[in-house]
Amino acid sequence: MGNPLNRLSITGEDTEYLTRNEVSKVLNVTVQTLNNWRREGVLNPLKIGGRVLYRKEDVYSNSRLVA
């Protein structure tokens, strides 16, 4: 998570982003599960600069995901 591309400032707010691989490790699920959740509207990623990123806040604050 030391990659500067994973920390972006939009409208003056610093927001941290996680890659699909990082999110799958944090939540102990597969990347395919993340794709399923995207289709089901459980956890929606952003596409930024051709990369699929998840807001760190969304990953940790979604009670449906955190045990």
Image (tube, grey):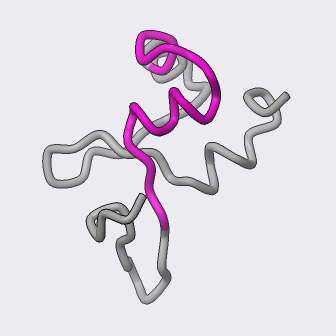
For residue 29, above or below residue 20: above
For residue 44, above or below residue 35: below
Is 56 on the left or on the right of 32, as rendered?
right
Q: Residue at x 64, y 29 (%)?
A: 27
| Whole-percent x, y for residue 55 in the image | 51, 53
- Between 63 and 67, which is closer to the camera in this rendering? 67
Instruction: Give the number of callouts.
Output: 0
| Whole-percent x, y for residue 46 in the image | 36, 45
**Image quadrant containing the N terminus:** bottom left
- Between 6 and 37, which is closer to the camera in this rendering? 6
Is 38 on the left or on the right of 48, as rendered?
right
Q: Tell whether position 19 is magenta.
A: yes
- Between 65 and 46, which is closer to the camera in this rendering? 65
Q: Tell whether position 42 is magenta.
A: no
Is 43 on the left or on the right of 61, as rendered?
left
Q: Residue at x 42, y 10 (%)?
A: 32
Is 62 on the left or on the right of 24, as rendered?
right
The kind of secondary structure the magenta stretch mainly shows is: helix
For residue 30, above or below residue 23: above
Q: Residue at x 54, y 30 (%)?
A: 25
| Whole-percent x, y for residue 10 in the image | 38, 77
Name the image quarter holding residue 41.
top right
**Image quadrant containing the C terminus:** top right
For residue 64, above or below residue 40: below
| Whole-percent x, y for residue 51 in the image | 22, 44
Q: What are the residue bounds of the magenta stretch?
A: 16-34
Residue extending farthest to the front is 2
Residue extending farthest to the bottom is 12
